Amino acid sequence: MEEKVSIKLYQGEIDALRLNNWLQHLEVHFNIHHIKEDENISFVRLKLEVHSLIWWESHTNTLRLEGDPPVTKW
């Protein structure tokens, strides 16, 4: 089965229902395209923009500065 799933960009809106819907679409995309777990984070990062991307970059920089390992698993 070949199905195209388009994942919208996530801007970081504070809306639990929209975030949950977005996350469910990601899970479907990962399953349909057999994306490996260690590739999920890289894919999701491409789908972040505005506030969510700023938060993610800040979080990963904090982990690096504190000597903690990077997030590698979904």
Image: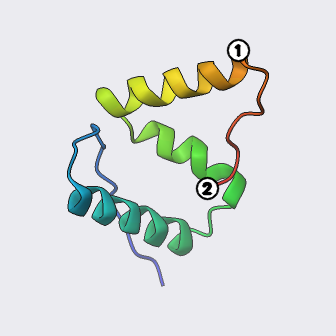
Q: Marks 1/2: CA distance? A: 22 Å
Q: Which x, y percent locates residue 72?
A: 70, 45
Q: Quadrant of residue 49?
A: top left
Left or right of 55: which side holds 66?
A: right
Q: Is 64 placed above or below 42 here?
A: above
Instruction: Evaluate if marks 1 and 2 touch, with contact meaning CB atoms under 8 Å apart.
Output: no
* Mark nearer the N terminus (1 vs 2): 1
Quadrant in which the C terminus is drawn: bottom right
Badge number at residue 23:
none
Between 44 and 71, the one lying in front of the other is 71
Q: Residues within 10 Å of mark 2 (few under 14, many from 20)?
A: few
> Is residue 44 in view from this perspective?
yes
Q: Secondary structure at mark 1?
A: helix
Residue situated furthest bottom in the rendering = 1
Badge number at residue 74:
2
Left or right of 45: which side holds 5?
A: left
Check disc 1 and report the residue beneath it.
65
Amino acid type for the residue under numbered disc 2: Trp
Between 13 and 45, the one lying in front of the other is 13
Q: Residues within 10 Å of mark 1 (few under 14, many from 20)?
A: few
